[in-house]
């Protein structure tokens, strides 16, 4: 029997955002309660709002946009979820990901730092003081695990407020189609990875497909076979 678990957050006006990301605006333009025939809204959000996916166009001008991907490329059948406890301003290094050596065929790596505990109780810390992925760790993944096509994390970003330049380079390393054997690694940020999940059989990332976009909010579905 299959169970389906949502590994993403709903978007609202209170959604935590990476520094300098424009605020979420959800505006009602038609309301039945006000005499209109239907309810209609306008949504104004960044392409990197809430649980979202970064594609190569985010950091590489010539990189693929969200609309350049096929549906199959957002399906992952060999996910690896690893626990990597990290606190404020800490950095995820190669040693933290050593368990990956035992799963060389994994096609998406999900890093559970536990930092999502700050998302509801201390939004400022969640947005500005999160753990980040080092450039060395990103390069190690690309060089040694060419099957990995996706990387998800339960933080606002693989970059952080105090390590922004390192974070930018980490993005470039993961998102480039050049210099490494495997395909660019799609990055899913601000994921919901609850502690009660120990294993996943499949992961589906379902983004909004908009022409030319550098990333998009997405719903992430985890599949568990009992």
Image (spheres, grey):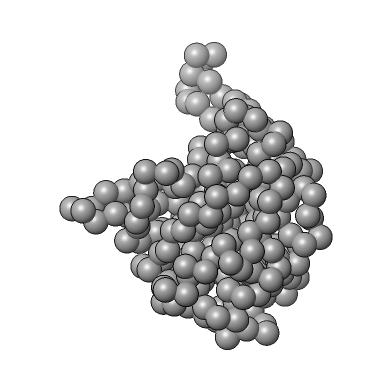
Picture coordinates of residue 173, whole percent (x, y): 69, 72
Picture coordinates of residue 83, whole percent (x, y): 48, 54
Query: Would you place residue 91 above or below residue 106 in this image?
Result: above
Picture coordinates of residue 166, whole percent (x, y): 77, 62
In terms of image quadrants, where is residue 209?
bottom right
Viewer-nearest residue: 196 or 86? 86
The residue drawn where x is 66% and y is 39% is 126
The residue drawn where x is 55% and y is 41% is 116
What residue occupies the far left of the structure in this picture?
A: 1
What residue occupies the far front of the structure in this picture?
A: 95
Picture coordinates of residue 81, whole percent (x, y): 44, 58
The residue drawn where x is 68% and y is 51% is 90
Q: Is residue 47 visible?
A: no
85 relative position to 225: left or right: right
206 relative position to 163: left or right: left
Query: Would you place residue 74 above or below residue 194 in this image?
Result: below
What residue occupies the far top of the structure in this picture?
A: 34
The residue drawn where x is 63% and y is 45% is 87
Viewer-nearest residue: 23 or 82? 82
Callout count: 0
Query: Would you place residue 56 above or below residue 15 in this image?
Result: below
Query: Would you place residue 113 above or below residue 148 in this image?
Result: above
Q: Is residue 96 visible?
A: yes
């Amino acid at each position: 029997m299959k169970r389906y678990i949502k590994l993403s957050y709903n978007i609202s006006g209170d959604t935590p955002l990476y520094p300098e990301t424009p605020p979420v605006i959800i505006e009602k333009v038609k309301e039945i309660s006000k005499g209109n025939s239907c309810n209609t809204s306008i949504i104004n959000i960044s392409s990197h709002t809430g649980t979202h996916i970064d594609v190569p166009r985010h950091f590489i001008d010539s990189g693929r946009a969200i609309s350049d991907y096929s549906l199959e490329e957002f399906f992952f059948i060999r996910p690896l979820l690893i626990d990597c406890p990290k606190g404020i301003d800490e950095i995820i290094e190669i040693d933290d990901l050593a368990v990956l050596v035992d799963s060389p065929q994994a096609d998406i790596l999900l890093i559970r730092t536990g930092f999502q505990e700050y998302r509801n109780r201390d939004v400022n810390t969640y947005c500005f003081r999160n753990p980040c992925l080092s450039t060395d760790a990103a390069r190690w993944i690309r060089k040694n695990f060419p099957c990995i096509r996706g990387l998800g994390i339960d933080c606002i970003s693989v970059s952080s407020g105090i390590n922004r330049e390192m974070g930018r380079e980490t993005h470039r390393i993961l998102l480039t189609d050049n210099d490494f054997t495997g395909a660019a690694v799609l990055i899913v940020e601000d994921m919901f990875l609850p502690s009660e999940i120990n294993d996943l059989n499949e992961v589906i990332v379902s983004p909004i497909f908009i022409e030319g976009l550098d990333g998009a909010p997405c719903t992430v579905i985890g599949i568990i076979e009992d």
